[in-house]
Amino acid sequence: MKKIVKFVRRKWKQIKRSFKLIKLKFEGNKYKRWYGSEYGGFFVSEEILKNRDQVIVYSCGVGNDISFDIKIIKKYKQSKIYAFDPTPISVKWIESQKLPDNFFFSPIGISNKNGAEKMYFPKNYGVSYGILNWDIENKDEIMVEMQTIERIAEKHGHKFIDILKMDIEGSEFVVFDSLDFKKIEFGQILVEFHERFLENGKKKLEKTIAFLEENGYECFAISDDFEYSFINKRFKTTEK
């Protein structure tokens, strides 16, 4: 009987979460604003950024579109963007750009461990290298340097990051699984989930969203292409 009760409660929570996310897709936070191009952008909650002396952003996975980062820099003059992408096409593209002084790029990947790791290159996705070999016809692979969010934050002396933005082709799940929220805090977490690459993707996505909620991060917006935006509940306004 207890197992049945637990099962019903779990399913009810899943239903409520799904309904809430659907509702957010059409309503969301009144302070949300779209930053960046249609392809490379995310919803941002401006309310918690307006009184910040300096906005620190970790932009993980930039490809050949830094429109999100440029919008942040234009809006918040004292911002600092720390961008990361190890894919050769992205590195070459970044080298060809005239970048703002407060945009700092590192050709490394974000993972749950530090050191060299293998990445795969799907034929039909120009800049989308990832640690998941989900293209069975793929023959292209490279070794790249990976670092954890914690290692990067420790190196720069950051214990609080205003925005963590991740579009890292499936690696987001292993990053969240290992992220220590006691060591580092975020104002907002913006992420494109790639659950479609995983066999049990829907279940993994639900588990990850629940994990973020348990650690104090609530989804406040979802784009038409299902980029999710989470806000730290400590900074969430009570105003409707």
Image (cartoon, rainbow, N blue to C red):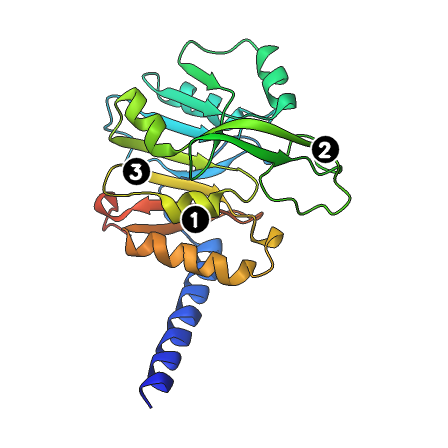
Which residue is disc 1 drawn over? Answer: 221
Q: Nearer the viewer, residue 133 or 191?
A: 133
Quadrant where the image shows the N terminus: bottom left
- Tell me which amino acid carries mark 2: Asp
Q: Secondary structure under badge 2? A: loop
Q: Nearer the viewer, residue 1 or 145?
A: 145
Residue at left 35%, top 16%? 77
Q: Residues within 10 Å of mark 1 (few under 14, many from 20)?
A: many
Residue 175 point in image, percent of width and height? 43, 42
Marked residue nearer the N-terminal end (3 or 2): 2
Q: Secondary structure under badge 3? A: strand
- Dividing the picture into quarters, in which one does residue 27 lie? bottom left
Marked residue nearer the N-terminal end (1 or 3): 3
Closer mark to the observer between disc 1 and disc 2: 2
- Separation of residues labelled 1 and 2 (CA atoms): 35 Å
Marked residue nearer the N-terminal end (1 or 2): 2
Which residue is disc 3 drawn over? Answer: 186
Query: In this rendering, would 230 be left or right of 158?
Result: right
Indicate which disc residue 140 carries.
Answer: 2
Q: Give above or below for 157 relative to 180.
A: above
- Tell me which amino acid carries mark 3: Phe
Query: In this rendering, would 237 be left or right of 58?
Result: left
Q: Nearer the viewer, residue 53 or 61?
A: 61
- Separation of residues labelled 3 and 2 (CA atoms): 35 Å
* Camera sees residue 161: yes
